[in-house]
Structures are given as C-alpha cells and as structure tokens.
Image (tube, coloured by chain):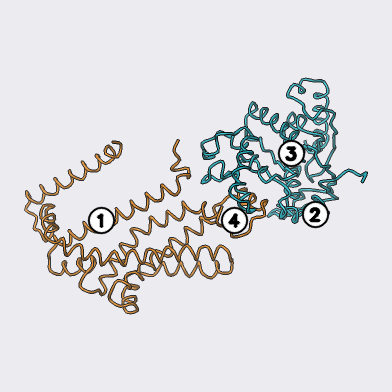
Amino acid sequence: MATKLNTIEIDDVSLTFPTSDGPVQALSGVSLDIVKGEFVSFIGPSGCGKTTLLRAIADLEAPTSGAIRVNGMSPQEARLKRAYGYVFQAPALYPWRTVASNIALPLEIMGVGKAERRNRVERGLELVNLKGFGAKFPWQLSGGMQQRASIARALSFDPELLLMDEPFGALDEIVRDMLNQQLLQLWDKTGKTVLFVTHSIPEAVFLYTRIVVMSPRPGRIHEVIDCRFPRNRTLDIRETPEFLDVAHRVRLGLRAGHSYDV
Amino acid sequence: MKAARDLLPPLVFGAAVLLIWEGVVRLAGVPSVILPAPSAIGERFVHSIPTLSADFLQTIRGVLAGYLIGNATGLLVAILIDRSPFLQRGLLPLGNLVSALPIIGVAPIMVMWFGFDWPSKAAVVVVMTFFPMLVNAAAGLRSAGSMERDLMRTYGAGYGQTLRKLRLPSALPFVFNALKINTTLSLIGAIVAEFFGTPTVGMGFRISTEVGHLSIDMVWATIVVAAVTGSLFYAIVALVERRATFWHASYRAK
C-alpha cells in the first residue's frame, strides 16, 4: 500500500449542544486526517471547540452530523477496544488509591493479571520519572507529579493513540516546560500518535508535527500549519527564528479567526 | 501521650460539673425525686449492675439488629434508585414519608406486628435509620466528578466496574455520615420503642417503670448507661470512618 495509514479521519463533523439559551454550535464542518505517529497540536481561544473535537474522537460526545473514524472504526468501537488513552485537564487520580494502583486502574478494568499489572506499573512509573513514588497517595504529590502519574495511567495499557486535553494548563511555566520536553521524548521513544489540545502558543509550536489553529463561534478549523522541526527537538529551538516564525503565524491565525468579534 | 492530653480537658470539665452538681444538691437540700446527687446515682449504679447489664444486653440487641438491617437496606435501595430514575421517582418520596412517621405511632404498631421482644425494637430502628442512609448514600453515589466518570468511560468500563471502583468509594464519606447519625438515632429509637411493650427488661422499660416508682436515681443510672453506650457506638463508627476514608480531604495526613 502506497497510501499513508490514517489513524484518525474526521469528515465534515458538526456538533451542536442544546442549552437553555438555545442550541450552541460547538463544531462546524470540521475535516482532518491524522497519520499514525503524528503529534498534532490543537490551539484556539476558549469556545473554539478544540476540547469538543477531542471528546468526539474519544466517544465522550456524539457529532450531530459528519463521521469520525479511529483506526478505521467508529469512535464507540475504538473506545470499547481501548484504542486510546485520554489525559484530562486535571489529573483525576482517585484519592483512595495509591499512585501505583491508580496507574493499574485501566489494567484492572481490562482484566490484566496481577503480575503483569505490577510489571507495567513499574515501567509506567519509570517512563514518567516517578520511580519510587508508587506507594504514595496522589494528594501527597505535587501537581506536576500528579499529572505525570495520569499520563502513566493513560499509557499503562499501551494504546497507540494518546488524547491530551490541556494536560498542563493548571501548572506553572517551569514545570510545564519540563513536562513538554519529557512528553516529546516519550513521543519520540514510543512512536505514539498524540493529539494535544492547548491554548498556549509556545506549547503548541514546541510540541507538534502539525498545528491545527481553530476559531470560535462556530468552532471550526482556521488553518493547519506543518512542521519543519526534527522529532528530537529541545527547548532551545524556541530561540530560533523558525520557531518564532511559526509562533507568529499561529498568532496571526488566531487573530484572523477571532477578528470579527473583537 | 497526645491522646492523654486530648482527654484531659473533657475529664476536668466533667469532674467539675459533677462536683458542682453534688455540692448544690447537698447544700440546697434538693429532694432526690427532683435531682439525686451524683454520689447517690453512683451508689445505685454499683448496686444494680446485674439489672443494668441485663437491660443493656436486651436493648443493644434491637439496636444492632435494626442498625444493620436499616443501613444495609438504605444503601441497597440507594444503589437501586440510582440505577433507575423510575424507582427514584417512586421510592424516594415513599422513603421520605416513612421517615416522617412519628416514632411513638410506629412503635406500638411494630410491637403488635413483631411481638414484645427485641425484634419489634429492631423494626422501629430500621424505620428510623433507613431514610438517613438512603438519602446520604444516594447523594454520595452522585458525588463522583464528571471527569472521573469520563475516565471510566474511556476504559470501556461497565456499570458494575464503575460502581465498584469509582462511585462506591467516592460515596463512602456520605455513607459514613449516615452511619454516624444512625448510631444515636437507633439507640433513641430502641429505648423509646420499649415504652410500648417489652418483656420486663430493657433500658426503655427500666426508665418507664422506675419513673413510676419514683426511683429517679435508677432512671439516672440507666441514662448513664445509655449515654456511655451511645458515645461509644458513635466513637467506634467514627474510628472505622477514619480508617476507611483516610484519603478524604478532612483526614489527610500531611
């Protein structure tokens, strides 16, 4: 086969939420194909539908019209086949479970045996640099460590697809820089397909093979920017003219998509 | 060491109250029918230990049986109505109605249904404890956050798994609230129910008959047993709660 393998196909998807003030169109005519192994950043102001799009891919919302295919399946089939790991805006670790047993939670649900669970939890802790913290409870860790644990949890069952919804939004910039770098190394090491929602321009530009710039009311794709940076980039690239150029293009895109209601 | 330091203030205050009580009763010559001195109550207590312990054993049976059945059915029904909106609409108002029934009306009926012995007291306790558990557990089952639920969904977890691994644990603080409220409710329920017919033993029976004989010191001795029992019951449940919900924000060890 000469064609590239699409992990996700989004075809003319619209999604309308009924609210007490009448229907709100969260997504309007969104189409996008994502190739296996890509790191796609979604950026846009609040209300642009970036989170809704991610949730629709994860079968947490149902599109009003249009179709989504994940690994060639419907989102629901993909969810039931555990095709993706989802990282939320907050760690959402269960406080009555230790860090290790939080990471083991999806494995327990999927019926993975005890010995194998312990193995994978160990590997997961190592992957996110939390070795030795498995016996702690989530509330004994810092916010950054908690979010890392939640990434280990999402990766514990080794899904090919990682959906991340502003995972570092609540963290300070120093921690965020560090986690961005670690996430990039993780992506490089594991070859997973990552969809990453953010509202931070530097984060979007640093972490991507493509940036999808979205605009609000109704939520739609404004522009898609391709990447020229190597996979194993470091934080230093943020000082380069190319980086600033892409950041500038994103900023212009955000402004253009936004201009009519400023 | 720390436990001793925590216990000291209430002990000192309690002793002070008893001393003042004793002094006032003696100096003012209060008749023992109105208020017996603590020393008189203590003496009566010591001499009546066999009677008091027989009363205690009789009443606690009804309390514990009713407490277990009432809480268990409350929790079970909470899980059922949580599953089905139809049951929720039907059962919740009914539970509300049952909880509003006056205990002095319910108790004689239960005695007619279940006889003079402790099962009728247990039945009264069931009626009293069922609703607090139902309401609290139902609220607890709804308390899990939407993100935590979405998480279970992304794992393709079924209803049972979500219930066991997320919703029941997050309901636990609510369930323990009901368990604590119900300790005192069940004791009150069982004692009051004994006013309406009982074999000639039990704390409620003792209070009602000794009041009739004007032996108020015996009434006080029974009150002491009831107060200590209630406090201990509550303390045990609170201790289990601390163990079981150590992760809750109100207990977290730093």
| Mark 1 and mark 4: Cα distance apart in space | 41 Å
Do dots 2 and 1 share one subunit?
no
Q: Is residue A123 above or below residue B109?
A: above
Which callout, 2 or 1, points to the residue nearer the camera?
A: 2
Residue B111 locus on image (x, y percent): 31, 76
The quarter of the picture where residue A121 lies is top right
The subunit carrying tag 1 is: B
Q: Say what secondary structure mark 2 lies in.
A: loop
| Mark 1 and mark 3: Cα distance apart in space | 60 Å
Where does label 3 land, which residue?
A196
Which amino acid lies under the numbered mark 2 shown in the image of this protein? Answer: Met
Which amino acid lies under the numbered mark 1 shown in the image of this protein? Answer: Ala
The subunit carrying tag 3 is: A
**Tag 1: Cα neighbours inside 10 Å, few (<14), some, or many (≥20)?**
some
Residue B125 locus on image (x, y percent): 35, 67
Q: Say what secondary structure mark 1 lies in.
A: helix
Please give the name of the residue rendered at 51% of the width and 55% of the height, measured from the top-left corner.
Answer: B140
Where does label 2 land, which residue?
A73
Question: What colour is chain A?
Answer: cyan
Where does label 1 land, which residue?
B227
Where does label 4 land, which residue?
B162
| Mark 2 and mark 1: Cα distance apart in space | 65 Å
